[in-house]
Each structure stands twice: as C-alpha cells, then as structure tokens.
Amino acid sequence: MKNKALITLLFLSILVLFNSGKPEYNDQKDQILLKLVYNSLNANHYQPRDVNDNYSEDVFDLYLKRLDYSKRFFLEEDIDKLKSFRTAIDDEIKSLEYKFLDLSIELLNKRINEAKSYYEVALKKPFDYSQDENFETDSDKRSYAKTKKELKERWFYSMKYETLIRLNSTYTRNEDKVKEEQKSFAELEEKARKKVLENTEKWFDRLAKQEREDWISLYINTLANVYDPHTGYFPPKDKEDFDIEMSGRFEGIGARLMQKDDYIEITEIIPGSASWKQGELEAGDLILEVGSGDELIDVVGMRVDHAVKYIRGPKGTEVRLTVKKKDGVIKIIPIIRDVVELEQTYARSSVLKNPQVENGVGYVYLPKFYANFNSEDGRTSSGDVRAEVEKLKKENVSGIIIDLRNNGGGSLQDVVKIAGLFIESGPIVQVKARNRPPYILRDTDPEVVYDGPLVIMTNFFSASASEILAAAMQDYHRGIVIGSESTFGKGTVQSFVDLDRYVNVLRNKDESDDFPSLGSIKMTFQKFYRIDGRSTQLRGVRPDIILPDTYEKIDLGEKEQDFALAWDEIPQSEYKTAFPEAFMDKLSLAKQKSNSRIDTSTVFKIIHENALRLKKQREETLISLNFDKYRAFQEKRKEENKSIEKTKSKIKTLQILPIEEDKLLMEQDSVFSAKREKWFNNLKKDYYVNEAVNVIGDINSVN
C-alpha cells in the first residue's frame, strides 16, 4: 500500500508539471527530475533526512567542494555571492528551482575562462627551481583566493609543481642514458613544461565540453549523497556502465576508447572481442565517423560517452567505423557487434604450493560479486565460484583460499549462495529496512560442496558483500579470516529506482514521444547485519589473523566517508556453528604459528615500517619546489621502496599450477594462456597469499 501511495503521489506531481504549460521543454525535464529525486529519497531511503536549513548547508558545502576541489577557480567574492543560498537550497528543491546551480556554473565558467591565461602565462617561460619555495598540496589547508592576483599566483605554483614532478621523472631517465644522448637541464625543463601545458589544455577542453546535463547530474548527485555516501543519481549512460560493470559483459565491438583532443582514439582491443576477431581496428586509430550502412555520423569533437551510444549495439548487428590510421590513411571498417566479456571481472582459480606445504592448496580469486540482472542466462559470481570449487576438488587440494581482497561487493544474493557452498544450511545475513523488523537471507540447500579447510582473505578495501561472506564464515566457525586490521565497513544495501517508470504512462499521453530518459537513483534502503546481530557498518570485519598492511596507519574505510550511517546492532539469529571445538583448536594453532612467522618475517617487518613512512609522507603536504631538495626527497622514497622490493625478491616463490581444465584451454587459446601466465607471475610473489597457504598447512597439522 505504501509503494502504491508513493507512485500515485509521484504520478500526480509529474502530471501537474506536464500540464502546467509554464516551463520550457528542458526546464520541464529538470523540474520533473528534481521532484522525483526529492520524493523518492524521502519515501524510500533507509534514514531520510529532514530537508531543512541543516540539510541545505550540507549540500552547499559538499557541492562547492566538488565543483572546485583544489580552490583554483573561485574567488572569495564568488563564495560570498553563493552564500546567500547556503540555507535556501531546501526551499529551492521544494519549489523546483535551480538558481543556486545556475549562479554557481555562471561564476565557475567565468573563472575557468580567466584561468586559461593564468596557466598559459605560468608555462610560457622556464621556472626557476633554485629558489626555496614551497607548494601546499592539501587543498583543505587552503582558503579561497581573495584577489585575482592571488589566484594567478596559485596557478603559477601549481603549474610549477606539476612541471617539477614530470621534470624529476625525466631527469632520472636522462641520467641512465649514454652521455651523447643526454639532454641539458634546460631542455628537460622545457619538455616537461610543454607536456604539462598539453595536459592542462586537454583538461580545460574537457571542462568546455561539459553540458548542462552534466552539471545537473553533479548537483543532483550531491543532493543524494548528503543522505549517505552510497546513495546517488545515475544518468542513463552511467546506469548502463554500472550494469556492464556488474555483469562483466556488454554487446559492442570490444575496444577501449579515450578522448584525444577533438578525436576519439582506440587505446586497446579487448582479446576475443568482435574488433579483435575482425582484425583491422588497432590501438592508435582515430574514429572519424560511426554508423550503419551509408548513414555515418561525424564524431570528431564529440565526447566519448556520446559516441559510445552509436558504437554499442545488439549482438549480430553491424557498425561501420571510419578511422584514421596511424599512417594517415582513412579507412572504413565494418564490425559485427558481439558480446564482450570482461574476463578480469570473473572468478578464477589455480593450485598453489610452497616449500612448507607439500600438498596443493586451491586458490579462488573473486574480484567482485557480479550478476547479470538483465538476463537469467548471464554469468553470476555464485555459479562461477561453485564451478571453480568443484574443479579444485577434482585436484584433491588440501584446502581452499577465497581471495576477497579489494572486492568492493555486489550481489547480496550471490553472497548467500557462495556461503552455502561451505555449510549445510542456515542464515547468512540479516537485512533490515526502515521501520521494519529484520528478515534473514538463508542458505536453504543442505548440500555442502566443500567441507575441507577454508581461508578467507580480506583487506581494507574488501567491502559490502565481501564483508558478509567473511563474517558468515567467521560466525559459523567455518573458515579462518586473514588480512588487514579491518575490512572497509560498508554495511548498507542499495537498490536502483528507475525514474522513467513514473513518467512512462505520461509519455504515451504526451505529444512528445522523445521525452528524454531521466536515469535512476541508487538508494540505500536497507542495512545488513551479521547473524550474531552486529552490523558491519563503519567497523567492518576484524580478521582472525591480522597481517601487516601498507595502509594500516592511514584512516580508511566507510568511517572516513561523508555522511556515513551509524553502527548499531540487532538481536542475533538462530544458527549452529559448523565445527565448534575442533575449529577453535585449529584457529588457535593457526594464529599462534602465523603470528610467529609474521614476527620473524623481514618482509612483514618492512611492510610495517613502510606503513609508518606512508603515514608520515601523507602528513607532509608542504612540498619544496627547489629541484635539489625535491629530488633528494624523492630519491629517499625511492631507496626505501627499493629495499622493500629487494626483500620481496628473497621470498621463496609460490608454485602456481593451472587446474587440468585450464591447461587444455591454455594449450588451445594463446590469448587465454597469455592472460593466465601474467596472472600466475604476479601471484608467485604475493607474500599474503603465501601466508594464506601456510595457514592451510597449519590447519591440516591438527588432527
């Protein structure tokens, strides 16, 4: 009933706007968007905010921070003009006005045009790097410039700093050359300055191509983000990209693109894709036209995200690209679109061995909890992980490692299914909506796919769904969690609200059939809790075995996000641990042995020392612009990094064995083989995975 009432309310609100006859077509669309976002957030968000002066102040501060993060455009007088809206944004939302946005963009565009001369003048002649000058790199420690003269000076030192970074890099490479090929300091400085000028011009060119809908998107996003950091507005293109990212596949030509001046350049051909099979499109080609048949659309000067709309399309259809090759030849290349699968997003496995563990250990790498919400036949992380675990069982592995490091989450349903692979049945996670009792997502399948030793790897960047899987295995005493001091701490659930559904009926009635798509709102509408009742929000999951981490001394995670929801807890659900006594014995021994190895490990000692250095470096935000001092500063950092790499090189490498099914594929597919070999080479020196293998050995040492 509540949802029906909301839809009716939104419908009536939009109907009034459609029939008011006052606003222009685009203004009408913008008003409808604002109305829908405002009503949707307050009706559906887990913890809706009172849209009042306090809310307005939060929006004002966050929006300006995003609009001019480095404080290189606005003057103090501009901020003073905008301050009249500081407590009025809530009123503007309710009256469906964009006066604050319009004024901010008007002022910003004015300052952008003025700033062109600032950077051009700054980069016109050589910088003097013999002076003892400093540059503050932390924009939070800066205030807005009071005068144009002060702002011009800020640009000067900013350009000098960026040139110094590039100059130091080229200076080092120059020293490694034979004397006859070495360039003078003046030549290197000029080359660095020209490159900074080129990059800055490109940045300003992208700013010039920003359209009103881009600024609207930024503004609406800020209105949503003030509810919590994971609630946001997705224009149609961004929603499409999100779906591709979640599913790991899209229908198109399989080429990566980037803006290069007025052109769109091919930067990479995805192996196995339609472009790769066709064979004529190459990295470095510039796209001039896109279309089908004889109807070709000029894309020179067009933004990449606009051109992509014409390039992507259904599987089996043809797209024709007019490209300029690297040798200047103009050529039309026809490509039949196909499904492009981004293999790096999918689960994969191998068998690992090290000198301390003779028997093979299964290793499953899961970069995200992907799912294809638009197709029942699409790949899912739960289906793929199950397949990899079953392959590893055939290899008679002595334990399995699930690597969730840097896994930002994804499909909650897939978490439940993956957890169910390792337990008989039972609750996996509790989910609570606003003003409602929690409900439990359960594994209802009594089948246990794998019942052997299990280790879950996490780090500071394991978030959301990753935390649920780690927590469930920990609460059931089913697996040992090892990793950084804590996981990310994102304990909220988001869902998309399609804004177009509220206007589809009206589109049919309205004479304008081409009313533009409004996009979607990704909204936090639930929080999830461990089965023991504790939230993972803010606090994350603390591993059973804590490994030193480069980022351990830096404030990271959900707790550092603006407007993050609070931690709380609810009653625990009923569940039985898998192996209560035996598991605790194994956990106790594994912790003891692992801690002993960590305490005597040169590598982990250096990682800890590096964490302290990184913390200190992050606090050193005032950087010298004297070349000799800056170079000495960077050389010291480089030497410290070298000592770490030198120590790493002494690690006894892991032996990586492809599973039998992958061996056959590697023999038949050279592209697949090259990708696997690259992955194996990176994995060999992974000391965290090495320690995880040791922990499996420790578990097996207990009868």
Image (tube, rainbow, N blue to C red):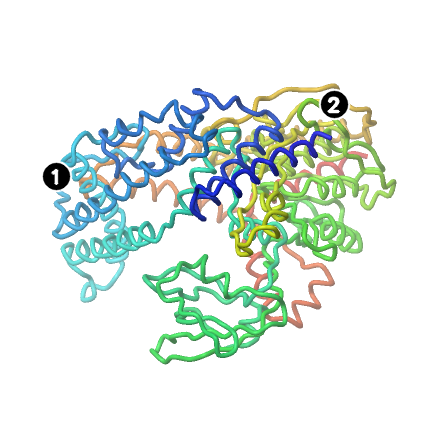
Determine whether the residue tagged by mark 2 lies in a helix, strand or loop.
Answer: loop
User: Residue 552's x, y, as percent?
Assistant: 49, 31
- Residue named by callout 1: 131
**Could you tell me which residue is drawn at 30 percent across and 29 percent down?**
82
Q: Which residue is denoted by mark 2 in the rendering? A: 437
State the residue in front, 523 or 169.
523
Residue 544 in view here: no
Outermost residue on the right side: it is 446
Give percent across and percent down for residue 379: 70, 55
Amino acid at the residue labelled 2: Pro
In this view, 251 is above or below 119: below
Q: Quadrant of the C terminus?
A: top right
Please give left or right for residue 104 compared with residue 158 in the image.
right
Left or right: residue 68 versus residue 232 is left
Label 1, label 2: how far apart the Cα atoms are: 66 Å
Q: Is residue 127 left or right of residue 62?
A: left
| Image marks 1 and 2: residues in contact by CB distance under 8 Å | no
When the figure is inspected, residue 170 is found, relative to residue 114, above or below; the finding is: below
Q: Quadrant of residue 484?
A: top right
Decide if residue 147 is in sight here: yes
* Quarter-of-image position of residue 57: top left
Q: Residue at (72%, 44%) from the top-left corner? A: 414
